[in-house]
Amino acid sequence: MKLLIADDEPAVRALVHVTLEGDDYEILEAADGLEALEVARDESPSLVLLDIMMPRLDGLEVCRQLKSDPDTSDIVVVMLTAQAQDRDRDQGLAAGADDYFTKPFSPLALLNMVERVRQTQSQAG
């Protein structure tokens, strides 16, 4: 399964990468919102782990654009962010996010969520 980690903090991308590597995942990375949008459109990942607060384009706008484009609307988008208020979660889900994870996150919980996405997609495909 191909997935995209979009976060402007290299340490967060590294942690997520290490958490998921070695489990049959092809992991792509983006350091800002515009790059995330470009990579998602070019590579068609099954899943995007998307930070909200990023330079050039925030994660909410990236999510809205991905979900409104027929070519990328099937990509599962999970917000992975420090924005932990209920209103932040509501905004993420309103933008089209399929799930919402807050930082700091449990690597095991993240791995379990990614596994659920993979199982759901293998059953659907």
Image: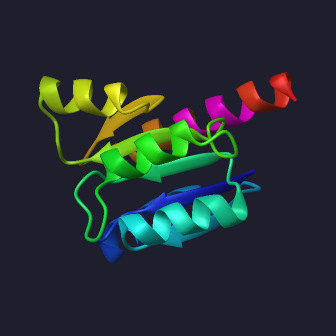
Q: Is residue 16 above or below residue 69?
A: below
Give the residue at x 41% y 52%: 62
Whether 114 is among the magenta residues is yes
**x and y percentages locating residue 42 in the rendered image:** 68, 66
Q: Nearer the viewer, residue 108 or 97?
A: 97
The quarter holding residue 100 reads top left
Please give the name of the residue rendered at 53% of the width and 50% of the height, measured from the top-left corner.
48
Q: Is residue 16 magenta?
A: no
| Residue range (magenta) | 113-119
How many marks on residues? 0
Question: 106 or 100, which is in the foreground?
Answer: 100
Residue 46 pos. (x, y %): 68, 46
Instruction: Look at the image and tell me whether residue 67 can be seen.
Output: yes
Q: Give x and y (percent) for residue 72.
A: 64, 45
Q: Residue 18, can we see it?
A: no
The residue sitting at 50% across, 61% down in the picture is: 37
The reply, left or right, for residue 100 in relation to residue 20 is left
**In-image side of 43 versus 99 (left or right):** right
Q: Image check: 50 left or right of 87?
A: right
Quadrant, the C terminus:
top right
Q: Position of residue 38 (x, y in %)?
A: 55, 68
Left/right placement of residue 14 relative to residue 58 reads right
Residue at the front extreme, as displayed:
69
Whether residue 90 is situated above or below residue 30 in the rendered picture? above
Q: Residue at x 60, y 59 (%)?
A: 40
The answer to which image quadrant residue 14 occupies is bottom left
Q: Is 103 rendered above or below residue 68?
A: below
